[in-house]
Image (cartoon, rainbow, N blue to C red):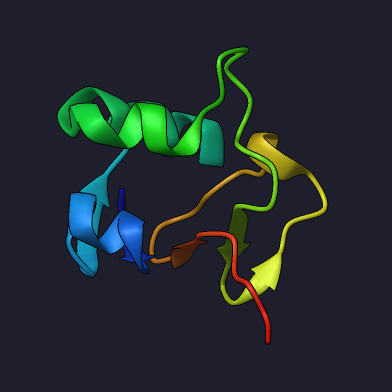
Amino acid sequence: MIVPLRAFAKFEDILGRDLKVELQEGSTIRDLLDSLSTSHHRFGSAIFDESGQVREHVMLLKNRKKSLSGLETKLSEGDEVAILPPAAGG
């Protein structure tokens, strides 16, 4: 299945802004992030902390909504995932 991915700020620098990622049916957001970490080495250290958890304040959206299931959120063909870094206000 193909999942469109939109990356912003530092994640855009690493991945590009708009990607289409091929995943197996039944894949989760964690599967997507692991795949990106394998294909883009700088991405893994940018999104995951030392314990393997997504860094605090990184926002992951599925179809423009925060996911209640976190990294275990199931993806389907055409679901759009967005990755946004921490943002500072002012």
Residue 17 falls left or right of residue 85: left
Q: Residue at x 51, y 59 (%)?
A: 85
Quarter of the image containing the C terminus? bottom right
Q: Is residue 34 visible?
A: yes
Q: Nearer the viewer, residue 29 or 84?
A: 84
The answer to whether 27 appears left or right of 20 in the picture is right
Q: Is residue 80 above or below residue 33?
A: below
Instruction: Compare residues 9 and 23 and report the one nearer the observer.
Output: 9
Residue at the farthest top position: 51
- In the image, residue 35 above or below residue 82: above
Q: Nearer the viewer, residue 51 or 62?
A: 51
- Horizontally, is 59 left or right of 42 in the view? right
* Rendering coords of residue 60 (x, y %): 59, 56
Res 63 → quadrant: bottom right
Up-down relation of residue 25 to residue 4 (above or below): above
Residue farthest toward the bottom in the current orientation of the protein:
90
Residue 15 point in image, percent of width and height: 21, 52
Residue 55 placement (x, y as % from top left): 61, 37
Q: Please report the residue visible at 31 percent of the width from the left and 36 percent of the height from the top.
A: 43
Residue 6 location in percent, x, y? 35, 68
How many numbered marks have been drawn onto this rendered protein structure? 0
| Residue extending farthest right | 68
Residue 6 placement, left or right of 14: right
What residue sits 47% from the left and 38% below the top?
47
Residue 25 position by quadrant: top left
Does residue 24 appear in the picture of this structure?
Answer: no
Seen from the viewer's position, the closer of residues 73 and 15 is: 15
Residue under the image location 38 percent in, 27 percent down: 45
